[in-house]
Amino acid sequence: MSRTIADLIQERFGLATEAGRGRPAEGALALLLSHRTQRRYKPDPIPDDVLEMALAAALSAPSKSDLQQVGIVLVKDRAKQTTIGGWIPDMPWIAQAPLFMVFCGDHRRIRRVSELRAHPFPNDTLDMFMNAAVDAGLGLQAFITAAEALGLGCCPISVVRNHVEKLAALLELPPGVFPVAGLCVGYPCPRSSSPTTPGARPGTRPRRRASASWIASGIRSPTDGRRTRRGSIPCRSATTSGRSSGATASAWPDLARGDSAT
Ligand SMILES: Cc1cc2nc3c(=O)[nH]c(=O)nc-3n(C[C@H](O)[C@H](O)[C@H](O)COP(=O)(O)O)c2cc1C
């Protein structure tokens, strides 16, 4: 076998592992492990059927209480896309992307259900906001994964929220619909940059090993490689730059055992 899932994990985290050594680097796992944000696109438009497949995948994401509170705006009016890009001049990829979208939370359905059933609606809470925002985030991720499977590249744009009132007016968002993130989409330009770390795939950004430890071992300080409640993992540091040379392969089996989550 040439490249394996284990190779992709190692490239992402800079941490040796045998997990996935027997699996070829293909399929959903390989796609997720190889993810990278793309900010430079070819001018080619996205065919309608390709877009439809990615949208269908986005709307297949899990949804809190099956309320399906994600709303997706396709900004097809180029002038509007240029306007949004003009508000954020340090991110020229917004105006340049062949497609710009906005993923929104949409509270309208739960309000409408209450109205139809003549129930009071005492749920105007932060939790309700959170539910719709999480639905939007899951839809965003599902869209990105599907788009990458179809050969596209994406860049989420949370900075649109710095312009939330102007954006809501420009896109004519109805009350109850709020933007969570924009998304630039297009066929990526071929890469010229070198890997961030020797052995890494070109352009993939390393992830902190400390983040991996959260999965099995509870929350750690994001700035501290030390465990909070139990024995040490050989992480040297957990800075945003990611990889450190202090870890050894033993960290992975340690996590995989899932010892007493805190
Ligand atoms: C919710 C969210 C918002 C983001 N907002 C922006 C943004 O406003 N501008 C941008 O260039 N990248 C943005 N990004 C992309 C991140 O910078 C990128 O995911 C991160 O650097 C990790 O790189 P990778 O996706 O290539 O692994 C955003 C990503 C997420 C998940």
Image (cartoon, rainbow, N blue to C red):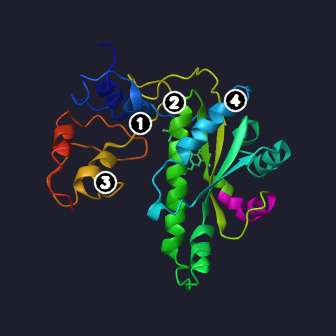
Name the front one of labels 3 and 4: 4
Q: Is residue 173 visible?
A: yes
Label 3 within 8 A of ligand 1 by Cβ: no
Give yes or no for contact between labels 1 and 3 (Cβ–Cβ under 8 Å): no
Residue denoted by label 1: 206
Give yes or no for contact between labels 2 and 4 (Cβ–Cβ under 8 Å): no
The percent position of residue 11, horizontal first and vertical second, equals: 36, 28
Residue at figure coordinates x 56%, y 86% from the top left: 120
Q: Is residue 105 left or right of residue 223?
A: right
Q: For the residues marked 1 and 4, what is the alpha-carbon distance in whole angstroms?
A: 32 Å
Region in magenta: 161-170
Q: Is residue 225 visible?
A: no
Residue denoted by label 3: 224
Q: Secondary structure at mark 1?
A: loop
- Which SS type dominates the magenta stretch? helix
The percent position of residue 67, horizontal first and vertical second, equals: 52, 63
